[in-house]
Structures are given as C-alpha cells and as structure tokens.
Image (spheres, rainbow, N blue to C red):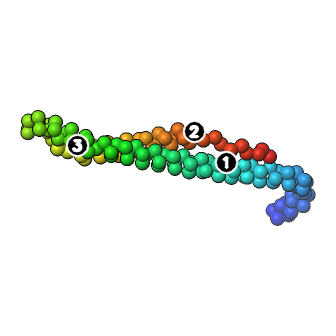
Amino acid sequence: MEDDKFKSLFSNFEPELSSDFRFMNKLQRNLNSVELVKQHIAEVRSRSKKAVLIAVIVGFIVGFLFSLSLPYLIDAVSNWQLTLPSESILNTFAKNFTIIAWLVIGGTSVFAAINTYEISFSLLKPKETSAY
C-alpha cells in the first residue's frame, strides 16, 4: 500500500531541467574563476621566490660584513680583558666573547634577511591579470 503511495507521488514528478545554455554559462564562469585563482597563486609564488632570493643575498652580505669586523672586536675585547679582575663577571663575558659575537652575527643576519623579505615582497609589484 505504501509502495502505491510512493509510486503515485513520483509518477507525476517531472523536475524542470535547466537549459544547456545556462548550465554552460555557469560552468564557464566557474572555470574562469578557477583560472584566476591559479594565476594569482602562480604570481604570488613568483614574487615570493624573488623576495627569498633578495633576502638570502642581504642576509649573507650582512653576516659577511660583520664577520670581517670580528678579529678587530676580539683584539679589543682581549685588551679589555687584561684590565679586568679575574673573578669579575665581565671577565667571563670576555672569555666567551667569540661565541656571543657569532650568535649576534647570526641573529643580525637572520633579522636582516627576514625584514628584507617582508620589504621586498611588499615592494614587488603584482603582474596585471586579465579579467574574464
């Protein structure tokens, strides 16, 4: 009995199908949207790669320049260490100056590279994309 009710309910059911033209238009709009997103992602990746390259170069240069000054700083700290009492906490600092200096050089290089990345990424102009 319930099968008859279902059969009678669905026997008169004739859903209206959308036209092929509307379906194709909607599909084309969706495909165009996907293409725009792909272009945007490719453009952002390209800008990001350029910004990373610039940041690596700047970080290397900053580290290299600070490394060139390291022998002069070590000599200055060694001369300063001779004037300090042996139990002084500054004497401990002077003995470990090379380690501290390398940490500062590395931190400065990383800091310069990160900031250079942010600045160069924001300054690189996005390419003009064609709108569909």
Residue 2 spot, x, y in % from top left: 81, 62
Q: CA distance from mark 1 to mark 3?
A: 50 Å
Question: For residue 65, which quarter of the picture?
Answer: top left
User: Residue 109 versus residue 21: which sits nearer the camera?
Assistant: 109
Three-letter code, disc 2 = Ser
Q: Secondary structure at mark 2?
A: helix
First along the sequence among labels 2 and 3: 3
Residue, x 86% and y 59% (percent of image)? 10
Is 12 left or right of 3, judged from the image as shown? right
> Which one is in front in this view, the residue at disc 2 or the one at disc 1?
2
Residue identifier under label 3: 74
Task: Report the residue that reaches farthest toward the left.
Answer: 86
| Residue at horizontal 58 percent and vertical 38 percent from the top | 123
Q: Which mark is residue 122?
A: 2
Residue beneath the point at 47% across and 48% down: 57
Which element carries disc 1, helix, strand or loop? helix
Q: Position of residue 73 (x, y in %)?
A: 25, 40
